[in-house]
Image (spheres, rainbow, N blue to C red):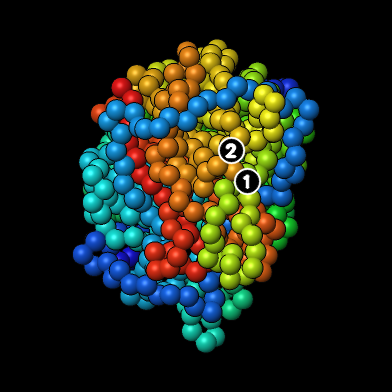
Amino acid sequence: MVARRIALVFGAAALALGQSLAVGVGVGAADSGNYTIQASQRVGTAHPSKTWPNVDYGTSSVEIPNHQPNSKTIRHTYAAGTPTVGVTGIASGQVAGFSGFAGLTHKDQRNAGTGSYANTQFTLEPPDQGLCVGNGQVLEGVNNAFQVFNTSGTPLTAPTAYSEFFGFAPEIIRTNPLVFGDFVSDPRCYFDPDTQRWFMTELQISTDPTTGNLKAPTNLVVAVSASSDASSTWTVYEIPTTDDGSGGTQTHSGCPCFGDQPLVGADANGFYVETGEYALSTSAFNGAQVYAFSKVGLELGTNTSAVHINAGPFTEPAFGAPAFDLQPATSPNGGYQTASNGTEYFLSSLDLGAGPALGTRASQLGLWRLTNTASLASGSPNLTLSFTAVDSETYSQPPNATQKKGPLYLGAIVKSPEGLVSANEDRLQQVVFADGKLWSAIETAVKQPNGATLSGIAWFVVNPSNGTVSHQGYLATAGQNLLFPSIGVTGSGKAVMAFSLVGPDFFPSAAYTILDPATGPGAIHIAAVGLFPDDGFTQYPKVGGGSGVGRWGDYSAAVADTSGNVWMANEFIHDLLPPARTLFANWATFISKVPAS
């Protein structure tokens, strides 16, 4: 259960504010006289598995929120210059040492919650994917619940509703009249190998309890475990993101705003979260916002302020649009960059029309350096953020994916055929700093030889010391689509890339490949074979107001443990009919492990 212990205090320390200085390069330093944001805090605890009611609430009269997770308007057409790539075969088996187990499903998410939170979850698509591994435990998060397992797949907790864990109002109380609660979304998690602590993040937006309409205030929510046991007690922090001058926030154009899709990273000194700032009333985009915390300060509760850097303006002079989705790096074995008194790296896509507007293609990546991170431990942090555009292979907006035809349940009820599967956009996915390099991947349109243009993957290994791409390439397979990649990398530079596989011959499946930067990806392996089409509400106009494209992703996850294994979590489709699924959605997730060393 959650006990509220809220104390909001605003400091008078320095606030870093970014300014672009030259084409392709930006530097921002601490601006004396501004302030950091101080977090409020309380306690959260996951529910032990023995208390799991394991009930099925069935379908209520109100299942779908009137504010689904943020989805940009994307023109899914490809521009001239879409890369023509070779194709990689699909293997019939697994790599040696592969293992896996079933993760959370939509039914688990919908039925999570105990006590006053029972039967208060909305039906949600897409799941998104949080995954972190350490101390013999695996933590998986989805929209909008999480669960802790041991590494054999045995549950250590029940599926726990994030709203209940964080201490927010239930998503919806199904009384007459209805009562709407806080909107929370976009889970991420991280296990710190140095301190043996767990971190989880989500965004929070207040709602009108009568109408469910979104309103201020909004927050970034960060939870930190009190020990190395993810199934025990956590401290929950709230950091204001409204940015309308209230609550000690900055004053930005068009706000009150919220921070979309929090992205997480860490180095020896700090824990970092990046969000994309959107206006609540107009969805106008203000660009990337970076929040830097003292890692140990959060863990001990002794330094809970966040340095807030407005990184959006960095790219405007050279690219005509604000920066978005700066993916902060994590490191698998504590191999952090100590230069410049501590450096945290970020990478980003520079197809800057992809997020808030209508982009087409790009052939550069954004390399970002946040330096002097050791100063986060002081009472006066003094950080500098710099940006450089790095030449890369071309990537472009991916087309939405066809899926194999098959039997439908919800689709049959509403008399609609199976829809396409959303590829979203060419947004750079998670970043890992390992073996002195930055590793990441992105969805891209790919033209197959003598074939159609489909969704594939562009992958990159960046040398941050000299600002160049040391290795790069593409992954595609004949006639099928690859969606939402993530790369897990061991400390020695052994990498595994996870993604979804879907196409005319495959129902949505969880897949992976071993990635050697010198020779490129190996054969594609299917970790969990999809058995039926995606049959969720977001694709059907008669149910979720969809346009024939079902929400998928929005991201997968892959992470290395300290023993040289890479763990992956991906969405796939396992069930067709209730009671294994719900009426409105049939997504499931699969957690797997590959020895990469």
Drawn side of residue 266 relative to residue 155, left or right? right
Q: Check disc 2 and report its element: helix, strand or loop.
A: strand
- Where's the N terminus, which quadrant? bottom left
Q: Secondary structure at mark 1?
A: loop
x and y percentages locating residue 285 in the rendered image: 70, 47
The residue identified by callout 2 is 481
Q: Residue at x 53, y 79 (%)?
A: 61
Q: Name which residue lies at 63% across and 55% down.
A: 419
Q: 36 and 394: which one is in front? A: 394
Image coords of residue 264 (percent x, y): 46, 40
Residue 435 appears left or right of 316 = left
The amino acid beneath tag 2 is Asn
Identity of the residue drawn at 58% across and 57% down: 69
Number of labels in the image equals 2
Is 208 left or right of 56, judged from the image as shown? right
Pinpoint residue 440: horizontal percent, then vertical percent: 51, 28
Give the x, y percent position of residue 254.
72, 54
Which tag, 1 or 2, sits closer to the chain's start? 1
To which quarter of the image does residue 546 belong? bottom right
The residue singled out by tag 1 in the image is 402
The answer to whether any part of residue 1 appears in the image is yes
